[in-house]
Image (cartoon, rainbow, N blue to C red):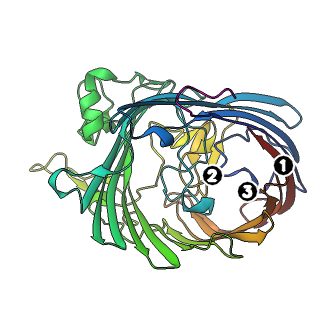
Amino acid sequence: MAQTKDGFEPDFRLSQTTSVSSGEDLPFWMTSNQNGIYTLHNSSYMLFQAGLNRSLDRDTLKKWGYSYGANMVYGFAGSSDFQPNEYWLGFRFHQLILKAGAQSDPIIYSGLSSTNGNMYRSRNARPVPGLSLSTNGYIPFLFAKKWFSWRFLYEEGILKDKQYITDARLHHKNLHLRAALSPSLSLSVGLEHYVFWGGVSPKYGQLPEWNQYLRYITGFAGGAGATLNDQMNASGNQLGSYNLELKKNWTNTSATFYWNHPFEDRSGMELDNLRDGLWGIHLINKRRTALLTDVVYEYMNTRNQSGSIPNHSDPTPEDPKRITGRGWDNYFNHGIYKSSFTHYYRMMGTPLFVPTIGTAGISEGFESTRMWMHHLGISGILGGGFYWKSLTTWSRNFGNYQKVYANPLDEFSFLAESGYNGAKLPFIVKAGVAGDYGTRFENRLGGYLGIEFNF
């Protein structure tokens, strides 16, 4: 790539990966958290990618900045699939960034998390195209800039894949505050809020759009023209999470503890389902050439869902809108936006929620929303440019409160990868094995070999 006038060189990448499986499809960890690049189902897969990226990272001291990028994907597995997986253009003015297009989030926790550290926002599905306004990471907070900082994101996307509600919009915003409790200890707390809104329903027709936008983003009940469900509850499909992150540094190591708490309605926001959520810890060895450099452990529980007594109407003369019961939250599913929290057939949050795809090729939501999970990710350096990593996940699935599995479905999935990323070769090579064993997926064993060129 030609060097630009400010001395910045965009990164250009070409890669190819060949995968095989003993089953009818590739194992879980070979296709999950891959930005939705695997779209076909077969026992073998050829994948080609070409990507370009210009980052903001090297010019943040300037008043203005810009970034752009794209990633094109071609897959062959008995049939062909081509997708513009990522494409974006961003502009920065001081500490604010305006971005248009579709770009995946940065990988955190060394890529060892089961959901990139966020139950609602992993790298499992193709990024949703739209517009966003955000801070450039954490920025100092007014007069308390030595101790407090904050960041926010506000974005609007549109779902153009095959959904039950066509042309539905996806609103997302978050706000996080970080406090420096000591030179080596910091605490961050935040709120994530999502709303599916607008679009055309095969049952209700055109749903309210911009004329009720303020109702959607504030969580108020629907107005005139909204469905009865929205008028009695909240506009659109509202959901989100509370987030917490605690970081501690020592001389040779550091640790990050993180927690996500999900909510679908008022009961979750008021912590009726406190026992549900994702708990994780990331341990880092600061000697980055060690045999063991990173360890991530995560536990996820979604079995409570505010209890086993469902929400239902129980009016009285004094309170005609009385609702009794606060349970059956049925995470990520929705009665009107039936394709649920998916984009191009994949869950946008934790990949342990696997959507059911109907005969019309449209997601019908998640059959199993009550589960628990243990996950362990480990990585390190073998020396001489060689690295290794492993992912192991065990889950037990119970279905949901309306359709309880007669026998819980247990599943064990693993991945082990090694590769070379040294100076002696002008490319990166990797090879790995993965497998699934249990009663949720088919039992299968697979392997892959990949090569990547960076310019």
In the image, residue 427 above or below residue 156: below
Viewer-side residue, 276 vs 122? 122
What amino acid type should be assigned to the residue bearing mark 2? Val
In the image, residue 87 above or below residue 255: above
Q: Which residues are magenta?
A: 1-7
What amino acid type should be assigned to the residue bearing mark 1? Gly
What amino acid type should be assigned to the residue bearing mark 3? Phe
Query: How much space separates mark 2 and mark 1, taking CA atoms?
Result: 26 Å
Query: How much space separates mark 1 and mark 3, taking CA atoms?
Result: 18 Å
Specify which label sits upstream in the sequence, 2 or 1: 2
Taking 136 as reference, is 19 left or right?
A: right
Viewer-side residue, 68 vs 183? 183
Q: Please state which of the two labelled residues, at mark 1 or mark 3, is closer to the viewer.
A: 1
Secondary-structure class at tag 2: loop
In this view, the residue farthest toward the bottom is 251
Q: Is residue 171 visible?
A: yes
Q: In x, y percent, where is residue 304? A: 43, 68
Secondary-structure class at tag 3: helix
Quadrant containing the N terminus is top right
Query: Image point 54% across, 74% down: which residue?
Result: 283
In this view, the residue farthest toward the left is 318
Query: Image point 73% across, 56% down: which residue?
Result: 28
Q: In x, y percent, where is residue 151? A: 33, 48
Disc ID at residue 450? 1
Query: Image point 56% across, 57% down: which residue?
Result: 115
Per the image, the residue denoted by label 2 is 354
Q: Count residues near mark 1 (Cα–Cα under 10 Å), then give few for <14, some for 14-19, many for 20+.
A: some
Q: Count residues near mark 3 (Cα–Cα under 10 Å), then give few for <14, some for 14-19, many for 20+.
A: many
Main secondary-structure element of the magenta-colored stretch: loop
Secondary-structure class at tag 1: strand
Quadrant containing the C terminus is top right
Per the image, the residue denoted by label 3 is 28
